[in-house]
Each structure stands twice: as C-alpha cells, then as structure tokens.
Image (tube, rainbow, N blue to C red):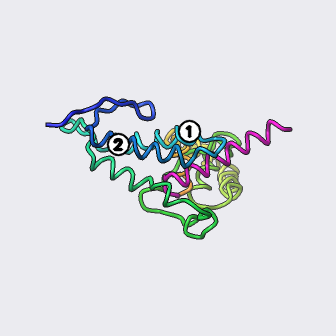
Amino acid sequence: MKITVSINLGGSSFNIDDDAYAELKDYLKRLEFHLAPEESSAEILSDIEMRMAELLRTSLTPYKQVITIDDVRRVISIMGTPQDFSGEESSSPESERIYSTGYHRMYRDPDHRIIGGVCAGMGAYWHVDPIIVRIIFLALIIAGGLGVLIYLILYIVLPEARTTAQKIEMKGRPVNIHNITDAVKKEFNSVRKNMKF
C-alpha cells in the first residue's frame, strides 16, 4: 500500500504516489535553481509544467488513475534534465536537428499569420518560407477559386498553435526544457524590443 498525494501541475490536478511526488518535486526544484538567473524563469517554468502535465495525462487510463514513479521518470527522460542542457549547447548542430518522429504536427501559426495562419503553419511544418505557400494558394485562387475552399477547410481542421509546446511541435523540434527555454527567451526578448519602440 502506498500513500498518494493530490497535486496541481500546469493547471491540471493529479493523484500521485508519494515516491513519485518526491522525485517530481526534486526535479522541479533543480529546474527552478537552474533557471533562476533567467529574467523569464517564471514563464519558462510555467510552460515546462504545462508540458509535463500533458505528458502525465497520457499515462492515465480509466483503470489507472494514479501517477507512479515510472511515469515521472518517463516524463523526465522526455523533458531532459538541466545538466543535459547546461553550457553552450544551443549553438550545436544537434540542437538544431529536425526531429520528425513524434514531434512534428501541423498547426495554424498565429505569430506569422496574414489572414488565419494556415500558410505560415504549413511553411513551418514543411520548413519552407510561408511566402511560397501563399503564392501557391494565390495561384489556386486565380486558377479557379479552389484555393479559397482548401484554405477554409484547413482553417477549420488545423488547430491554432497557442502554447509554447505546440509552437515547438509545429517546427518539428522536441518539446524539452532546452527548446521551451529558448522559445520563451525569444518571445520575452521580442516583447521587450517592441516595448522599447
């Protein structure tokens, strides 16, 4: 028999074994310490917790309603540890490699949209300039209007990339602490630049 604890992680409530809770708490404390020098550490930790909650939800079934230590270790192995990403690894070619298995999903891109973000999302998914996709849609519209119908269908079918994790998935990169940290830093710096002007 084990003691279970009820926790709130990334806005989701979980029942978790006490040993799994201790490991998760230790992991989050190490992350908090590692990210403490960052100006946007609170936003980074919030996004990491949201991603961890998404991953932990996949462990639950109608027959299994408690998170175990194996579930926590699986999530930590996916997210990575601060030691994995310490140093200047962000400039290495390994961190820029595209991961196509399990991470690549098509979304509408709200950050680079002109109308609905369909072309920008398709460009991010296929790693091409969104202008090329826009030109193709424009050619389909001029050739008989089929482009409008396809665009509307894709607008309805494709979800918008709202969270940091979805924006990372859209680009085909793994959703781990390194990529979440980079994405939040870039967004934070972009907002700061816009506020200066």
Could you tell me residue 51's position as x and y percent?
A: 45, 43
Span of residues in magenta: 173-197
Pointer 2 local density, CA inside 10 Å: few below 14, some 14–19, many at least 20? many
Residue at x-position 28% and y-position 36%:
16
Residue at x-position 68% and y-position 46%:
112
The label shown at residue 162 is: 1
Could you tell me residue 78's position as x and y percent?
A: 41, 55
Q: What is the C-alpha distance between the residues marked 2 and 1?
A: 20 Å
Q: Is residue 190 magenta?
A: yes
Could you tell me residue 136's position as x and y percent?
A: 66, 56
The label shown at residue 4 is: none
Marks 2, 1: nearer the viewer: 2
Lower position in the chain sequence, tag 2 or tag 1:
2
Amino acid at pointer 1: Arg
Taking 86 as reference, is 2 left or right?
left
Query: How many numbered discs sit on the rendered protein?
Result: 2
Residue at x-position 60% and y-position 69%:
92
Check the image and name the residue furthest to the left: 1
Q: Which residue is mark 2?
A: 56
Residue at x-position 68% and y-position 42%:
188
Give the dominant element type of the magenta stretch: helix, strand or loop. helix
- Above-or-below relation of 48 to 79: above
* Secondary structure type for disc 1: loop
- Foreground: 197 or 36? 36
Could you tell me residue 121's position as x and y percent?
A: 59, 49
- Above-or-below relation of 63 to 30: above
Taking 60 as reference, is 170 left or right?
right
- Above-or-below relation of 29 to 13: below
Q: Is residue 192 magenta?
A: yes
Amino acid at pointer 2: Leu
Decide: marks 2, 1 in contact (CB < 8 A)? no
Check the image and name the residue furthest to the bottom: 93
